[in-house]
Amino acid sequence: MSSADQQQSRSFAQALGAKRTRLERIEPELNEGLPGDVRDTTTAEDMVAIMKALLIDGDAGQLARSRLQDLMLRNTTSGKRARAGLSEPFELADKTGAGDYGIVNDAGVLWQGQRQTIAMCILTRTEIASAPNSNDVIADATRLIVSELAA
């Protein structure tokens, strides 16, 4: 990614509320995730801010919001992750990620029928390069979120 593209991406993320997100590379290099490497990193707080801005507040405009929401609602990669932790009437528009070091991530917006809409993000990792990716951790965390919202 060129220096100008990096700055544009960083500025866009910051405009959406991200304070610590770094964007330096493109797929698939950005998935490397070496411990201590700050390139292409974010925080759960930043991802929640971005999801909220794009999918709840509509900061990128209504057309972009509708298209992004439609794409993310049809996401199939979280079937064994966050979507596995859902129950009726919850619905999720999300984006997943995975890599070495046990990295399994899921971020998106959770709807509870006509009730509250929330942005959520679950990020996992270890310091062991060969650690398995555990979809169950994401599913279990989602179950906890859903149980708190349903209470």
Image: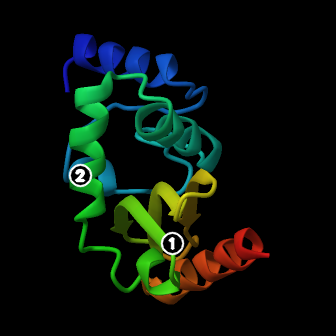
Q: Of helix, strand and loop, which one carries label 1?
A: strand
Identified by mark 1, the residue type is: Phe
Q: Where residue 140 appears, x then y in whole percent?
A: 61, 85
Which quadrant of the rendered structure holds the C terminus? bottom right
Which quadrant of the rendered structure holds the N terminus? top left
Of residues 33 and 13, the one nearer the viewer is 13
Mark 2 and mark 1: Cα distance apart in space: 16 Å
In the figure, residue 106 lies in which quadrant? bottom left
Of residues 45 and 87, the one nearer the viewer is 87
Q: Are marks 2 and 1 in contact (CB under 8 Å)?
A: no
Q: Residue at x 51, y 60 (%)?
A: 111
Q: Residue at x 21, y 41 (%)?
A: 67
Q: How many marks?
A: 2
Q: Where residue 84 appears, x then y in whole percent?
A: 44, 86
- Crowding around mark 1 (Cα neighbors within 10 Å: few <14, some 14 to 19, many 20+) is some
Residue 70: mark in rendering: 2
In the image, taking residue 96 as reference, residue 82 lies left or right, namely right
Residue 90: mark in rendering: 1
Q: Is residue 129 visible?
A: no
In the figure, residue 32 lies in which quadrant? bottom left
Q: Earlier in the sequence, mark 2 or mark 1?
A: 2
Q: Where residue 86 appears, x then y in whole percent?
A: 51, 81
